[in-house]
């Protein structure tokens, strides 16, 4: 069991409102995007163009890009704070968080030429890296079994891959210029380990659409602008492969801890929103001649959700500090993701129940946010797979899959 492994680094975990200027600035931006804005998008399954543009213009979607490539060069915690505040304000970062999720793969494993080519354009807001194609319809959570195949073709005009396959739940693909795509470059029966033979390609969808790439929206329970992607003899320049051929799964895994921490931060923001909303309503709604918040049946679920919020937030901050210190943080990042999404779900339930029938009325925004946090139990990683990680890698139980 690894749980009690000593951490030798001198770690500090900041408490309270860290990055206060960023928080204040995000709150100001979010004031321009109230509930009506999100409800209208939700009803039309539309993309929050104006919101994403406002964040881009203010430089918040490029905080993780180093300064030499035009970004702010801030640590992961800054990205977490941005996403937390967006969600705490009742907005949703689902339309644009992938630029933070995927950035590490390009930064850590991309070549200098690729960084020069893409990062300044992304930082300037002229290029969007918002699509991340991993999940496939037939293989789901079993990522190493994915079927999308890329074959290298040697070509005097420039080597390229010919890609065939299908992805599902590729969010934002219709609103992104680039897609980070995980493909199999060596057939599974020709590799020693199933994690080998996968590669990451950066697909320029501006060139690819209509030439082997077809994107179809999926109508879903939440407005996540998610799609199915059909890939048919698509040519992708070999120069767009990130890192070495065959090591793509490792590169994606490298980014998972950051992704878990960032997703957890969004859940923390949602939890804050639900608790605030529930508390305000419980204090103000009078039934049987008293505010409903006077009833312990109403108070206690909100108070319990608050205790879960505080505990989950400590885990997020601990995982972030370990990440920043370059220490192993897989256990902590996974636990942070699990606890914060569960806190968000408990808070969502308490908030909905506190609102009674009005919780179901779209104009209160509770039902929309309730739907949105439910997704976090499944994407970007489902709760069971986090528990499987803890069981196997922390507790030393047998691998279950
Ligand atoms: C709104 C939304 C947006 C998404 N965006 C993206 C995106 O941008 N890019 C992308 O690549 N993917 C995306 N996804 C896909 C998401 O990552 C997957 O849905 C998720 O990883 C689970 O895969 P699956 O849906 O195929 O479920 P499955 O793998 O079929 O699993 C179904 C259920 O069985 C459980 N299960 C499976 N195997 C085990 C096991 N061994 N032990 C215990 N339980 C198990 C799972 O936990 C789950 O509850 C998105 C999904 C949604 C809903």
Image (tube, rainbow, N blue to C red):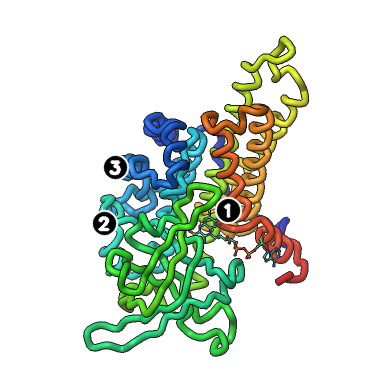
The quadrant in which the C terminus is found is bottom right
Which residue in the structure is indicated by mark 2? 121
Is label 3 within 8 A of ligand 1 (CB to nearest ligand atom)? no
The numbered mark, 3 or 1, whose residue comes first in the sequence reads 1
Q: Which mark is residue 9?
A: 1
| Image point (43%, 78%), residue name | 164
Lower position in the chain sequence, tag 1 or tag 2: 1
The foreground one among 33 and 60 is 33
- Does residue 321 show up? no
* Residue located farthest toward the left when viewing the structure as drawn: 157
Residue 388 lies, in percent from the top left, at: 70, 63
What element does badge 2 sit on?
helix
Q: How many marks?
A: 3
On residue 252, which mark appears? none
Where residue 376 appears, as percent x and y from the top left, is: 59, 50
Closest to the camera, between mark 3 and mark 1, is 3
Question: For the residues carrying marks 1 and 2, which lies nearer the camera in this image?
Answer: 2
Q: Which residue is mark 3?
A: 57
Crowd tier of the residue under label 2, counting other residues whose Cα lies within 10 Å: few below 14, some 14–19, many 20 or above:
some
**In terms of secondary structure, where does tag 3 sit?**
helix
Lower position in the chain sequence, tag 3 or tag 2: 3
Image quarter where ligand 1 lies: bottom right
Confirm whether residue 266 shows in the render: yes
Residue 243 at x, y percent in the picture: 40, 74
Give the spatial CA distance, label 3 vs label 2. Answer: 13 Å
**Where, quadrant-wise, is the N terminus in this rendering?**
bottom right
Mark 1: secondary structure: loop
Q: Residues within 10 Å of mark 3 (few under 14, many from 20)?
A: some
């Amino acid at each position: 069991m690894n749980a009690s492994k000593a951490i030798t680094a001198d770690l500090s975990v900041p408490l309270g409102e860290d990055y206060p200027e960023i928080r204040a600035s995000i709150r100001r931006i979010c004031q321009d995007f109230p509930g009506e804005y999100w409800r209208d998008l939700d009803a039309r399954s539309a993309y929050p163009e104006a919101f994403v543009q406002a964040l881009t213009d203010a430089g918040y979607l490029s905080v993780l890009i180093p300064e030499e490539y035009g970004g702010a060069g801030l640590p992961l915690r800054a990205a977490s704070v941005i996403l937390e505040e967006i969600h705490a304000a009742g907005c949703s970062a689902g339309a644009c968080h992938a630029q933070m999720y995927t950035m590490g793969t390009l930064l850590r494993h991309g070549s200098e030429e690729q960084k020069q080519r893409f990062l300044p354009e992304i930082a300037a807001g002229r290029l969007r890296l918002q699509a991340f194609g991993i999940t496939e319809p037939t293989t789901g959570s079993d990522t190493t079994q994915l079927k999308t195949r890329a074959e290298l073709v040697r070509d005097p005009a420039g080597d390229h891959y010919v890609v065939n396959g299908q992805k599902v739940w590729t969010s934002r693909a219709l609103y992104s210029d680039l897609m980070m795509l995980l493909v199999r470059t060596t057939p599974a029966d020709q590799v020693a380990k199933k994690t080998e033979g996968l590669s990451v390609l950066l697909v320029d969808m501006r060139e690819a659409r209509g030439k082997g790439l077809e994107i179809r929206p999926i109508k879903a329970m939440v407005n996540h602008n998610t799609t199915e992607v059909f890939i048919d003899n698509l040519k992708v320049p070999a120069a767009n492969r990130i890192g070495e051929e065959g090591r793509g799964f490792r590169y994606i895994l490298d980014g998972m801890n950051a992704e878990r921490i960032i997703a957890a931060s969004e859940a923390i923001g949602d939890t804050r929103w639900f608790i605030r909303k529930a508390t305000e309503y419980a204090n103000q709604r009078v039934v049987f001649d008293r505010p409903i918040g006077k009833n312990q049946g109403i108070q206690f679920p909100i108070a319990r959700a608050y205790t879960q919020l505080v505990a989950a937030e400590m885990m997020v901050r601990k995982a972030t500090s370990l990440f920043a210190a370059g220490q192993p943080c897989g256990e902590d990042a996974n636990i942070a993701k699990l606890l914060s999404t569960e806190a968000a779900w408990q808070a969502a339930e308490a908030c909905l129940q506190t609102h009674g029938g009005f919780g179901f009325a779209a104009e209160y925004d509770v039902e929309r946010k309730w739907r949105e946090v439910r997704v976090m139990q499944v994407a970007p990683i489902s709760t069971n797979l986090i528990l499987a990680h803890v069981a196997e890698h922390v507790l030393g139980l047998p691998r279950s899959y």
